[in-house]
Amino acid sequence: MADSTTPRTIVSACLAGIFCRYDGSTRANAKVVNLIRRGEALPVCPEQLGGLPTPRPPCERRGDRVLNSEGCDVTAPFARGAEEALRLARLAGCTRAVLQSRSPSCGLGRIHDGSFRGRLVDGNGVFAALLLENGFTVLTEDDL
Ligand code: SF4
C-alpha cells in the first residue's frame, strides 16, 4: 500500500484502461493498472480535461501549435488540459508521471511530426513538457 514515503504517480488515463483516446479506445497497461490498484497512482486525460470530446479527430503538434487532422487549431484546449492535469497532480502530491508514448499531450522524447503520416520527430507532448518544466520525473509506459 502507498504510504508517506511512496512517490505518488500521475498516469495517462488511457494506460489505466480508460477509453479516452481520440478514437474512443484504451491502451490499458497492466503495470499502470497495478499502480492504481495499490493506491500509488492517479489517472488523468489532459485532452479530456481541456474540454475536447471523445472520440475526437487525431491531433499532432506542429511547432508550438497543435492541429487536428481537419486543420483546426486546438492549441488552447491542449494547453488548458495540461494546466488542469498539472493542478490535479499537485493536489494529489504527485512527483512522477508515467505517460503514453508518442501522444501530442503525453508523449515523451518522440512524438508525431504534424504531418499525420505516422512520422516521428524528437519532442514532447504538451502535458509531458509542462510536467518536466515543473520538476516532475516523467517516464513512459515502456520504462516501467
Ligand atoms: S491525452 Fe494522454 S491520457 Fe488522454 S488519451 Fe491521449 S495519451 Fe491518453
Image (cartoon, rainbow, N blue to C red):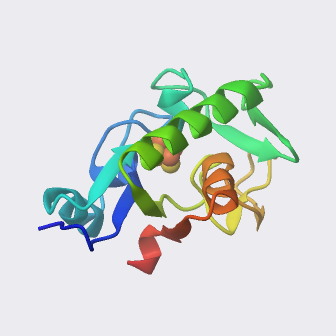
Viewer-side residue, 93 vs 70? 93
Where residue 23 sits in the image (x, y, percent)?
47, 34
- Picture quadrant of residue 56: top right
Viewer-side residue, 143 vs 55? 143
For image coordinates 60% across by 28% down, the residue present is 57
Viewer-side residue, 20 vs 12? 12
> Looking at the rendering, in which quadrant would you find the N terminus?
bottom left
Residue at the extreme front:
4
For image coordinates 68% across by 69% down, the residue present is 109
For image coordinates 24% across by 62% down, the residue present is 40
Where residue 41 sits in the image (x, y, percent)?
29, 57
Residue 105 versus residue 143 in the image, above or below: above
Residue 28 versus residue 6 in the image, above or below: above
Q: How many marks?
A: 0
Residue at the extreme bottom:
143
Where residue 85 sits in the image (x, y, percent)?
50, 40
Asked if residue 27 can be seen in this view, the reply is no
Viewer-side residue, 83 vs 104? 83
For image coordinates 24% across by 67% down, the residue present is 4
Where residue 78 sits in the image (x, y, percent)?
65, 33
Asked if residue 90 can be seen in this view, the reply is yes
> Looking at the rendering, in which quadrant would you find the C terminus?
bottom left
Judge left or right: residue 27 versus residue 136: left
Judge left or right: residue 113 versus residue 79: right
Residue at the extreme left:
1
Judge left or right: residue 121 versus residue 89: right
Residue 8 versus residue 19 in the image, above or below: below
- Picture quadrant of residue 60: top right
